[in-house]
Image: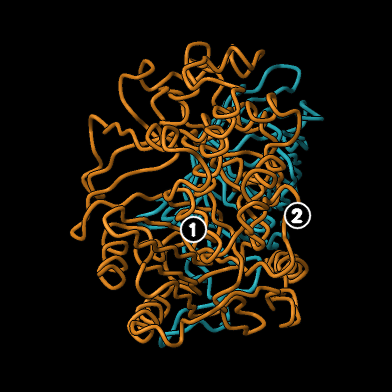
Amino acid sequence: MNRILIYLIFITPTVLFGQGKAIPINISIFNESTAIPFTRFVTTPIHPGLQLGTEFNYISKVHSRLFQTANLYYFYHNHLAQGIGLYTELGYEYCLKFGLAFQALLGVGYMHTFATADEFTFSNGHYEKKTDKGNARLFPSLSFDIGYYIKKSEKNSPEIFVRYQSWIEYPYSPDFIPVMTHISLHIGAKFFINKKMNNNE
Amino acid sequence: MNKIFYLILALFLLFSCKKSETIETTFYDCNFNFSDSSSTNPDNNKYQSLLDAITSSGVVGITMSVYHPHTGIWVGASGKSDLYNNVNMEPCNISRVGSTVKMFTATTILKLMEEGKLNLDDRISSYLQGDVINKIENADKATIRQLLQHSSGIYNYIQNLKFQTASLNDFIREWKPNDLLNYAYNQKAYFQPDEDVRYSNTGYVLLGLLIEKIEGKPFYKVFEEKLFIPLGLTMTKFAAEDHIPYGIVRGYIDMYSNLQVVESTYYSGWDYYTADGGLISNPYDMNVFFRALMNGQIINSNSLNQMLTWKAPKEPDPSFFPISYGLGIFKIETDKGIAYLHSGDAVGYYANMLYFPSDSTTIVYAVNSNYGKIDQFVSTKEAVEKIINETKE
């Protein structure tokens, strides 16, 4: 299952929308929190996360572009859960002349969460400590970010960005808390790595 | 791509999950002596079977006390007080009993009234000033009685989704009264005072501040002086004094409604310092308190009559018993007759105490697990009915 997801999210876009010699890599660290989206920005305590991803342009104009991302992430929310997930986003970017860029991204993906403490499972009339197999979650997201292209004049300029991501964890706790809302505040960078090309390319 | 996976995996393993505490079983020993005739109680087997049925359905552990005038008090327990260290629950064990403290808060207010220090129909704004009055709608005109009876219309901070997500975001945070009241600031009141009744923790946070203003000391110190010590409630304390007191059973939450629980003993910091929760006790002490209150041993008959003056909500909850609100107490209509009660939740804990005025039967139970699927076994109408039917004659 996971292999299929990885193929769909990472490999398929590469085949369909391959962009020549340089592949963009997005890397960010983020602070995850349970919160009502757009009511909080910086939250404490810090629940750290790391995200790696790439992106592929559908349409690219002088000041704007429509693109798709593919991301892999992990976060650790102390005392609540740790999650690992794969998701993709449809993004729109508008870039000003001097390199400042604004993005809006709508995403969907899969997340698997695990407990951060020993979990006891009820079985045969009593509780026993068992290996946590985790919980499957749908992961829709809506993000806005502000970035800055360091070498705007270059096609493959590196970028630094701050991203405010709101997302939903569903299902959460059936008949108790149907969905859980989260926010993640990312600080990250985009850079390009060169792809090894065949001689006849 | 493999490198990415190894990096993620390394992070995952780095944090992984925390191991539970190893706790000596002696931690749960009770220094608690009373004349225990439970084993010779004619209903001993029936009560014990009830508790065993509850724990075999998915509740981690339960303690219970049942008082009948002709057989005295029975205490029992079933399940575990600590899953990781495999410790059995004992009848004397203490746990968090959450909002049941509201009956203690109301009783203390009524005692202050008897001492001539306040009048129930005084406005709370006569005693408290500042943001707690100015930023909470209805707080300027609500009376002490209305706060006690949940008829002030003041917004319940616990209902604020921002509070709920914030408390999940920092499970071990210790919240002070103003931290909690902040979530009631600038929120629309449910109704004008006295128009209806609707449960509000905010009102009881204000009542705790009122006790402190009048007595010049923490409200839980006043509880000690006026209630715990005079009644000999040696196993009863307030969380502000000691968040995790010696002997407290571990709490567990079924966060995802799948009967897979994690420990939550340290997660109730939102009620350590406010008079809407935070009580720690055992069913024996709570049974003693409830009967003493109803027998007129704590407050006089005039005060008790005021406490037991009822108001019914305009829109009753169809999923629960028909209910009326008194001052820090509720009245429900059951198949076995009228019962007075107050229940309480903390994170990983639930307790309920019931008193039947027809024959003084008093039932108190406390469990060390809640949320998700577990609630259906302890706090729903069906669960309470089952307990009443097995314990009330």
Direction from residue B41 to residue A111 in the image, left or right:
right
Q: Amino acid at mark 1?
A: Tyr
Residue B173 image position (x, y, % from top left): 71, 46
Which chain is mark 1 on?
A: A
Please tell me whether residue A199 is drawn above or below residue B141 in the rendered image: below
The residue located at (49%, 64%) in the rendering is: B366
Question: Residue B244's image quarter?
Answer: bottom right
Numbered label tally? 2
Residue at (63, 34) in percent of width and height: A164
| Three-letter residue code for mark 2 | Asp
Q: Is any atom of residue B282 visible in this view?
A: yes
Disc number lying in front (1 or 2): 2
Pointer 2 chain:
B
Residue B393, image quadrant: bottom left
Q: Which residue: 53% across, 63% down?
A: B253
Q: Please state which of residues B293 and B62 is positioned toward the viewer in this rendering.
A: B293
Query: Neighbour class for label 2 at 10 Å: few (<14), some, many (≥20)?
Result: few
In the image, which disc is placed on residue A110?
Answer: 1
- Residue for badge 2: B242
Where residue A168 appears, as percent x and y from the top left, is: 48, 46
Display colour for chain B: orange
- Residue at 31% over, 56% down: B356
Find numbered disc 2 in the image and state the secondary structure of the residue it sits on.
loop
Q: Quadrant of the C terminus of chain A?
A: bottom right
Question: In screen coordinates, is B222 left or right of B298?
Answer: right
In the rendered image, residues at marks 1 and 2 fall on the same chain: no
In terms of secondary structure, where does tag 1 sit? Answer: strand
Q: Nearer the viewer, residue B194 or B11?
A: B194
Q: Position of residue B197 (x, y in %)?
A: 34, 29
Q: Is residue A39 visible?
A: no
What chain is colored cyan?
A
Q: Say which mark, if any, is on residue B235.
A: none
